[in-house]
Amino acid sequence: NHESEKIYIGFSQCISSDQWRKDMNHSMMVQTSLYPNINLKISEANRSVEKQISQIEDFIEEDVDVLLVSPLETKKIVPVIERAYEKGIPVILIDRKIDSDKYTAFVGADNIAVGRMAASYIASSAADNISILEIKGTDNSSPTIERSLGFNQIAKEVDNIESVFTIENYTDDQFSRILDTLDTTKTDYVFSFNDILARSAWQVAENKGLADDLKFVGVDGLVGPDGGINMILDGRLQATVLYPTGGAEAIKLARRVYAGEQVPKNNSLNITLIDKLNADIMKNQYEKINEQQLELEKQLLAIEQQEEKYYVQNNLLKIAMAL
Ligand code: FRU
């Protein structure tokens, strides 16, 4: 019977420490706990492609039933992923893409759409002659490439965005120097690859007394003290694009793939623009979902303890009967 078979899912997570990644891992674990027959193992590569490749090699070695990968970048990872795929292991990519079509399915938001949404927001919220500083992501990942692409597509299309100056390989020092030469009568917006970089850039501007001259737009939209939603509420961010992690969806997809179901190759997740008009609502929604998740985890724990008790009692009974 298929239901009682153990499914071993290996997840190779490219980055270890930021809140967005933690949320992704957590939503996978919560989803996994709903199915007692899934065994999920998460390996974190801490931003090292080499480490990620060797962790995927280990998963291939262990013959995982389904391999989930959030790849650090698009190219170097290709051979090992193709090896897994050609060996017959279903491969589900999450959040980031690769330069190959040898994988089973992708789940994640459309990052070109993310960039376009941010630029459309900026274009619609100010009058004319907008100048923008774009802070690009610092790796060669598909979100870095695609967000920038989508953003600049719209920036070229609309009449009121005058210029986009793109900053590659962001550092605080470099941003500080750029601010020194800034014509503050012109630069209106900073579009940042994610809320984390937006937070750093805002701090640099704040230290120079320039934060009020710039409007910051980010991506991710997490809650928590340094999350994008809170930064909107406390005035650091003008807006952010909610970028869902897809953790739960990846586990659901993995089950379907394991069951032999034909799944779509591209599984696109919805994005949403958050600014001060809906930040409160989004925060409330988040908190509600979190509460429900905690409640669910409590109940699952209670069931587990109940099962253990039953197991112990059953064993005691058996011993008693044997005496
Ligand atoms: C987190 C992160 C997010 C971003 C995503 C893109 O590690 O950098 O901020 O939206 O990865 O892959």
Image (cartoon, rainbow, N blue to C red):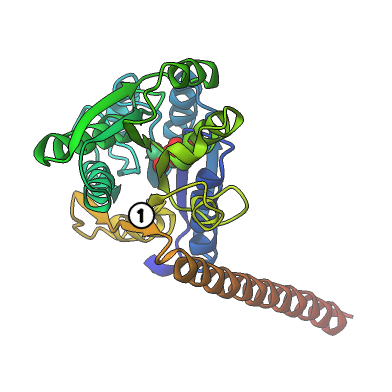
Q: Nearer the viewer, residue 131 or 85?
A: 131
User: Whole-percent x and y of residue 156?
Assistant: 12, 34
Using the image as rendered, state which of residue 38 and residue 219 is in the foreground: 219
Q: Is residue 238 visible?
A: yes
Taking 287 as reference, is 112 above or below it? above
Tell me where residue 32 appears, x and y as whole percent.
Answer: 50, 61
Q: The C terminus lies in which quarter of the figure?
A: bottom right
Amino acid carrying mark 1 in the image: Ala
Task: Using residue 174 as the reference point, say whether residue 254 is left or right of it.
Answer: left
Q: Residue at x 84, y 78 (%)?
A: 316
Relative to 52, say whether 218 is above or below.
Answer: below
**Residue at x 47%, y 47% (from the top left corner):** 237
Q: Residue at x 84, y 77 (%)?
A: 319
Task: Give the percent coordinates (x, y) of residue 289.
Answer: 52, 71
Q: Residue at x 83, y 84 (%)?
A: 321
Determine whether, in the image, residue 63 is placed left or right of residue 143. Answer: right
Secondary structure found at label 1: helix
Q: Measured from the top left, where is residue 220 in percent x and y?
A: 43, 48
* Residue found at the very far front of the displayed protein: 185
Q: Splitting the image into four quadrants, where does ligand 1 fall?
A: top left
2 in relation to 72, above or below: below
Q: Is residue 87 visible?
A: no
Q: Nearer the viewer, residue 91 or 157?
A: 157
Question: From the image, which quarter does the N terminus lie in?
Answer: bottom left
Q: Quadrant of residue 149?
A: top left
Q: According to the image, label 1 marks what residue?
A: 254
Relative height, residue 246 to residue 133 (above, below) = below
